[in-house]
Amino acid sequence: MSRFRPIDREIDFCLRRDALPAAREHFIRWYSQRGRAWLSSRVADYQSRMEAAPAGVKVQELGHRWGSCGKGDWLYFHWKAILLPARIAEYVVVHELAHLHEPHHTPAFWLRVERAMPDYAQRKAWLAEHGIDVDVL
Ligand SMILES: [Zn+2]
């Protein structure tokens, strides 16, 4: 048996071990759909105050990255972002929105992030330390 903890619920799912490979795909799909709605709402909250105009939000597998800013000003987020604490996922949103103005991690980029989220450094540090542990299985 293996245990899951879905976001913001104190419920564990139990699955038979032989169901796990398919279960992972199912959970990724479920988290991606749920994540897209939630992340889109966070993007909508921050985009006007950051004077950013993303084309939209896509949620998918991004390897070791939490987010990226792609061609045509689309914002991409890792499906695991929805498993992060909300305040940490919001930092990922602000980070990617700032990239619409500044493609690289220059001082001007970090200043833009700080203006939108004054305590971003704490959230960034949490993500660097704990982000690696976040997974569905
Ligand atoms: Zn970046």
Image (tube, helix red, strand yellow):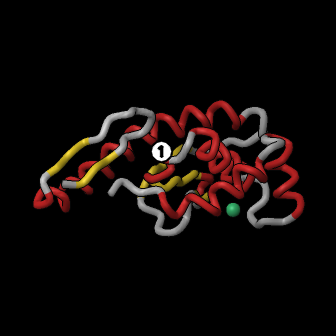
Quadrant of the rendered image containing residue 46? top right
Image quarter in which the N terminus is found: bottom left
Residue under label 1, please give it: 82
Q: Position of residue 121 (x, y in %)?
A: 78, 53
Query: Is 102 placed left or right of 55 in the picture?
Result: right
Q: Position of residue 32 (x, y in %)?
A: 39, 46
What residue is shown at x 20% (from left), y 45% (from top)? 14
Figure quadrant, ligand 1: bottom right
What residue is shown at x 62% (from left), y 46% (from top)? 88
Q: Position of residue 70 (x, y in %)?
A: 58, 60
Quadrant of the rendered image containing residue 49? top right
Foreground residue, 136 or 104?
136
Element at label 1 = helix
Foreground residue, 99 or 2?
2
Query: Is 104 placed left or right of 60 in the picture?
Result: right
Q: Is mark 1 within 8 Å of ligand 1?
A: no
What residue is shown at x 83% (from left), y 56% (from top)? 110
Query: Is 25 placed left or right of 95 in the picture?
Result: left
Identified by mark 1, the residue type is Ile
Label 1 Cα neighbours within 10 Å, binned few <14 / some 14-19 / many ≥20: many
**What is the tally of numbered marks visible in this picture?**
1
Query: Is 18 placed left or right of 108 in the picture?
Result: left
Q: Position of residue 98 (x, y in %)?
A: 74, 51
Image quarter in which the C terminus is found: bottom left
What residue is shown at x 10% (from left), y 60% (from top)? 18
